[in-house]
Structures are given as C-alpha cells and as structure tokens.
C-alpha cells in the first residue's frame, strides 16, 4: 500500500525488524502474535494471514531442537571474515522455528540435538541468535 510515495507496509515491517533486533540485543527472542486468531510469527510480522494487524509481542523459549544445519563457506557481505561458520534451523517447543548461528561445538552438530538459544550482539552492534549445545 503506497501513500504519497511512502511504502507504508514496508515502513511498518522495517520497524518490526528494528524492534525484533532491539529485543535480541536485550537477550530476548520475541515473536509477534495475532490478537484476533492467535497465530504466531517468528521472525515477527506486522500483519497476520487472517489480515489482522492487531499484533502483540510474545517472548519465546530459549531452547529447542536442531532440525537442519549447514556450513557457510561463502558468506554474505559483512560476514566474509567469519566464514566458514555453521548455521542451523531450530524448532522451539511451541513449534516455531528460527535460523541461528551454531557455536560452542566440540563435535559436528547432529539433527535432533537439543540446543540453548542465546540472542545477543555480534560485533557489538548487529543482533544475532546463537545456539549452543544444551
Ligand atoms: Zn490472525
């Protein structure tokens, strides 16, 4: 939806991403929840699939199960000096999933392993979600 050259939905979604990052820097993993139908979104969204925009923030548990992982050899801009590194998909006890950086390993990760999530800062400015073996 565009009003006077401003992409309103994009602006709203950007503010959601900004708030999500701020929560990560406070060591919180937050999702948005639709007040109309209860659907949860992680990463958060400003609009529900039921078309409602009446959303609230809900805190997610900081634990889960590793569902998939891979090694990043060719990193995106800004991450080149970190490669190779390991990323994964973690499923939370409530069924939500989130992509994470996996650290603290003493052996290769295994699908199905339990992990603890550590939202926080990376290079002291970027927000990141790390997962370490539980
Ligand atoms: Zn909804």
Image: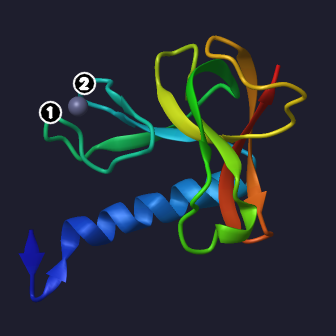
How far, Cα to Cα, is label 1 from label 2?
A: 7 Å
The outermost residue toward the right is 106
Image quadrant assignment for residue 3? bottom left
State the quadrant of the C terminus: top right
Q: Quadrant of the N terminus?
A: bottom left
Could you say which quadrant of the image residue 70 lies in?
A: top right
Mark 1, secondary structure of its residue: loop
In the picture, the disc for residue 50 is 1
Q: What residue is shown at x 63% (from left), y 11% (from top)?
A: 112
The 10 Å Cα crowd at callout 1, few under 14, some 14 to 19, many 20 or more, is: few
Q: Position of residue 101 (x, y in %)?
A: 67, 44
Asked whether residue 89 appears in the rendered view, the answer is: no
User: Residue 69 at x, y = what percent?
Assistant: 58, 31
User: Does the image show residue 70?
Assistant: yes
Closest to the observer, 20 or 128: 128
Q: Which mark is residue 37?
A: 2
Task: Mark 1 and ligand 1: say if the CB distance to the nearest ligand atom is below 8 Å.
Answer: yes
Q: Residues within 10 Å of mark 2 (few under 14, many from 20)?
A: few
Question: Which residue is found at the position 67% from the left and 67% from the top?
Answer: 126
Residue behind label 2 places its C-beta within 8 angstroms of ligand 1: yes
């Amino acid at each position: 939806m565009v009003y006077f050259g401003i992409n309103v939905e994009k602006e709203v979604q950007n503010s959601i991403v900004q708030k999500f990052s701020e929560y990560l820097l406070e060591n919180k993993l937050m999702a948005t929840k639709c007040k109309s139908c209860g659907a949860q979104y992680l990463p958060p969204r400003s609009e529900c699939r039921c078309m409602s925009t009446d959303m609230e923030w809900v805190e997610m548990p900081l634990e889960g199960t590793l569902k998939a992982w891979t090694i990043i050899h060719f990193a995106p801009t800004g991450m080149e000096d970190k490669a190779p590194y390991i990323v994964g998909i973690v499923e939370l006890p409530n069924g939500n999933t989130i992509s994470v950086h996996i650290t603290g390993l003493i052996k290769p990760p295994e699908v199905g392993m339990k992990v603890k999530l550590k939202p926080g800062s990376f290079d002291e400015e970027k927000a990141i979600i790390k997962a370490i073996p539980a």
